[in-house]
Image: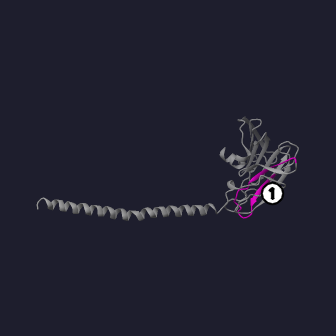
Amino acid sequence: MKIFIPLFLLSIFILQSCGNETKDKATETPKRTTKIAEKENIEEDNYTEMNDEPDEDDFVYPETGNKASDFMPKMAIYDYEIQYETMGDLNNDGLKDIVIVLRNKEIKTARRPILILLQNKDKSYRLDKVSNLAMPIEYNEYDFKLFDTEEISIEKGDLNIKLYGKDNYFGTFKYFENDLLLTSIEAFYRGAGSQQGIKYDFLKGEQTTTEIDLISDVENPKVTESESSIDKEKHHFENISIIDFFNNNE
């Protein structure tokens, strides 16, 4: 009897330990299930938020068309319209190309894509470039219109974007083979008693800064101008914002 009693007690202890381990595993399983469910709920919430506004980078545009309105984005959540349109020879082939700025009809703070439509010999058009950055948003989150006047034009092979407001911004783009590059960019700031202008000319490799002092003599203000050398950098139309350019270089 002295031999079997310890073995019997040991057997009971082993059975109880196994039972407790099984019970612990059973209680842990719902916790894992809960975490997975929470993760799935988060992913669903994120998916819903992403669909509140369109992502212009995912838009699909027709590759060819006979007129500007043929190039409206496909698969877009909201309707778009042509806000600005200009015509002229951009790539020096003797044909009249089209540049259009699109505007979201429902969301004022949405990006405004610019499309470059090059004309073919048969008078049809092909989509060559798209920029979601070159033209800034029209209104900010406080429903404030950023610029009073906006202009786009094609002159002597140059694409010009001009923005007039409290501060003025101007950008000029030109084709070099298959690339549409920024050739010059300019900003003009108004302050109390003074005005400042800064221009980058990437063709010449020059930066020009102009200071206008209005305090000393309003009718004949003092104008100070200075020049310095800069690198002849390449800024592609698709990747440059003429507003953020100056914000990033301040």
Count neighbours of disc 1 (C-alpha within 10 A) and say few if under 14, some if 14 to 19, many if 20 or more.
few
Q: Quadrant of the N terminus?
A: bottom left
Q: Examine the image and state in which quarter residue 4 appears.
A: bottom left
The front one of 237 and 61 is 61
The front one of 26 and 114 is 26
Percent of width and height locating residue 196 = 73, 45
Q: Quadrant of the C terminus?
A: top right
Percent of width and height locating residue 11 = 22, 61
Q: Residue at x 71, y 49 (%)?
A: 243
Q: Is residue 120 magenta?
A: yes
The front one of 211 and 69 is 69
Whether residue 250 is visible here, answered yes or no, is no
> For the residue marked with disc 1, what is the amino acid?
Asp
Would you name the residue on which mark 1 appears? 70
Q: Is residue 227 magenta?
A: no
On the rendered structure, is 235 left or right of 4?
right
Seen in the picture, residue 61 relative to 92 is either above or below; the reply is below
Secondary structure beneath label 1: helix
Bounds of the magenta span?
99-121
